[in-house]
Image (cartoon, rainbow, N blue to C red):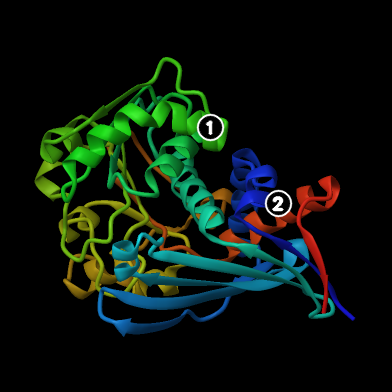
Amino acid sequence: MAEIRVLGAAELKQVLLLDDVLAGVQQAYLAKAQGKAETFPLVFHDFSPKAADMDIKSGHLGSEGVFGLKLVSFFEDNIRCGQAPLSALVALFRAGTGRPLAVLEGSALTGMRTGAAAALGAKYLARENSRVLLVVGAGHQCVYQVGAMLRAVPSVRRVLLHDAKNPAQAREKATALPSALERELGVYAAGVSIEPAPDLAAAVGQSDIIVTATPSYKPLVQAAWVRPGTHFSCVGADLAGKQELDGAILAGARVYTDDTPQCLAVGEVEMAVKQGFLAPQEIAGELGQVLAGQKPGRTGDGDITVFDTTGIALQDLAAAVCALRRAEAMGVGTVVQL
């Protein structure tokens, strides 16, 4: 008989901490580079193009003795019914026996690990003393992106928010974000200016670090706007055909990935290669390889760096392990006998 722990959204708020997730995702990247972790092929099904889909990301995090998967579904019409469009579950198993360990609600976990992924890209690839962060997309991801970045790159003192589809949301989010960061992530934004940026071209030209977190299928950020030394962490292009950056940006950049085969199939890299701006062999490496000292990162202050993070199961598994350990220690969650 197997015993598993079930952690819902309310329980995760008690046990899923941003600092834990940042450390866990970093170790997962490193384990992948060292051959102690691997990702499995992505499973995707489109129920209705650009309106309803599901994907399964899975992998083996050998460094933590677990394997598992995350299933995410997106049904846009749910919004009309007052329901969340995104649903997610994470299942965790013990590597040595294959026995189930836990099932976790995956929405908040996905948000936090995605923020951590982008922030780690900036921590290790952006210029030192980067001060201005631009987040393109003021939706659900915004609080996680800003919170993780402020924690991982404490030199950031100004945050710009842009949302082309909903400028009002960017204005509202700029006002609400300081309290949301403290309430949801325990991040204090004292001394940090957070403001809306309705003019995207002007905002890009002022920014040291740019995070793109939209569902766009056409380029939003144009190469002509980008100044030397800019770093991009791209999280929105997680399905085939999605694109947030002008492919010409990647042509002149040092390009890094979280998982190169996956990024060649779904991501900014996918589109840049298909459009002839980038050859696969021109990819500088995976972020984990930089952490492991296997590949060089930024080579000078003038480099434009791009981190294409399409999201891999190892990020989810690392975050799930962090949450499970705290839950077991605190007695949080429901234990079920199978």
| Residue 128 visible to an observer of this rendering | no
Outermost front residue: 81
Please, what is the three-letter code of the amino acid marked with disc 1? Arg
Q: Nearer the viewer, residue 255 or 88?
A: 88
Do the residues under discs 2 and 1 have CB atoms within 8 angstroms? Answer: no
> Which residue is at the front of the view, 240 or 147?
147
Which of 230/110 is in front? 110
Residue at the image point whose x is 26% and y is 67% from the top: 242
Helix, strand or loop status at disc 2? helix
Which residue occupies 50% across, 44% down? Answer: 120
- In the rendered view, does 174 fall on the left or right side of 153? left
Q: Position of residue 157 (x, y in %)?
A: 37, 22
At 40% from the left and 24% from the top, the residue drawn is: 129
Indicate the position of residue 321 as horizontal and vertical percent values: 71, 57
Left or right? Give the position of 196 relative to 262: left
Mark 1 or mark 2, which is nearer the start of the sequence? 1
Judge depth for marks 2 and 1 and give the one in front.
1
Q: What residue did someone put label 2 on? A: 322
Q: Quadrant of residue 143?
A: top left
Q: Nearer the viewer, residue 87 or 242?
A: 87
Residue that badge 1 annotates: 183
> What residue appears at the point 46 percent right and 63 percent down from the top-left corner?
311
Q: CA distance from mark 2 to mark 1?
A: 20 Å
- Quadrant (top left, top right, bottom left, bottom right) of the C terminus: bottom right
Q: Is residue 249 above or below residue 149?
A: below
The type of residue carrying mark 2 is Cys
Q: Which mark is residue 282?
A: none
How many labels were placed on the picture? 2
Please state the horizontal and vertical placement of residue 42, each as a whole percent of the image: 47, 79
